[in-house]
Amino acid sequence: MLNDNVFARVSDFEAMEAELTGIRRHLHANPELSCEEVETARFVAEKLESWGYEVTRNVGGHGVVARLSAGTGKKGIAIRADMDALPIAEETGLTYASRSPGKMHACGHDGHTTVLLGAAEYLARTRRFDGTVTLIFQPAEEGGKPSGAQAMIADGLFQRFPFDAIFGLHNHPGAPEGNILLRSGPMMASADTVHITIRGVGGHASRPHLTVDPVVIACNLVVSLQTIVSRNVDPTQTAVVTVGTIHAGSAVNVIPESSKLAFSVRSFDPKVRDLLQARIVTLTKSVVEGHGATVEIDYQRGYPVVVNSEAETAFAREVAEELIGPERVSTCHLIPGSEDFAFFLERKPGSFLRLGNGLDSAILHSSKYDFADGSLTTGAALWARLVERYLAS
């Protein structure tokens, strides 16, 4: 029989609620973009050091890694939070709105960081675990090249700070505050970007027969690309090919020399991802060359699929149900957005969770978005209990 009093509960964090809210709002008011998280990293590191953690700064850029051991256990667990903001002008009207014009915590990373700081303080104070906990505060999740996860891995994260499993979370607009959503296996999509330049023969709009029109070719290509998902991908799989930009010409009576397209490609299966790339490249060359033009294809692989380990996800679900009750824990649907936490999961078992941000929450990356402070204590308690249960003696 599990003794619930031995492990962290949400009620253990009620006295910290005002402090956590203050931390979160401080971070919200002072956002820093990817690869610029100097003050955020300093703020985080100083708090961790004051609580007795062994802190390493500047891991993979502005990353902060904190470690704490208790007992004699040999197991290790890692929890990750991201710290960067987005280049969005905030329109919330909040008293703690961004003080940096054009920068905003529009994805809730201020909340993710605060939740992990709350768990960190509790774990340092109580030390009711047997082993080593590694807390990873990651920069540059929002599209850095390399991303923060890749940079920290390249800087020796796994070798310098060994652990057995890794967990992370993201807030989830549309789910009740403090509810927890999980999913074993593929959960979030891979995200690749393709830039295509079509080079034809320009000329006068009245004499198209003397040209190779890159605008017409681009239009044909957009339509042809839509057949890849409908005719090449297994109907039981999910994939998206979305052309986001088309640029060509500058005058109404001139057929331009070239046209450019850029599009996003997403999927939930590595084999489907490979299929999409192969078909896009082949079809693009066929369409363009069939019209007598030439083409340059820049196919950029972005974040891979977030694939949660079965055992670690089942364990996280068990902990979540203990913490808030099974009625507030549910299976997450597939999410077509992407996350660089996937790079960690390619190398270590673990699970990426979702934390409810409110039924009426603005969507992620919206200028009206705000992290729900009502979820802070639940998130902090979840991480604390997960560590205690994973490293139970």
Image (spheres, rainbow, N blue to C red):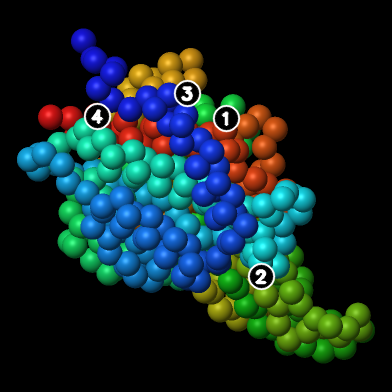
Sequence order check, earlier mark of 1 and 4: 1
Query: Residue 342: horizontal and vertical position, in percent?
Result: 38, 51
C-alpha span from label 3 to label 2? 40 Å
Sequence order check, earlier mark of 3 and 2: 2
The dot on residue 177 is 1
Establish if 342 lies above or below 333. Answer: below
Q: Are the residues flagged by discs 3 and 2 in contact, CB closer than 8 Å? A: no
- Judged from this view, the residue extending furthest toward the left is 72
Pair 3/1: label in front = 1
Q: Inspect this view and state whether residue 125 appears.
A: yes
Indicate the amino acid at tag 1. Answer: Glu
The dot on residue 261 is 2
Query: Residue 75: horizontal and vertical position, in percent?
Result: 14, 41
C-alpha span from label 3 to label 1? 13 Å
The dot on residue 95 is none
Q: Which residue is mark 4?
A: 389
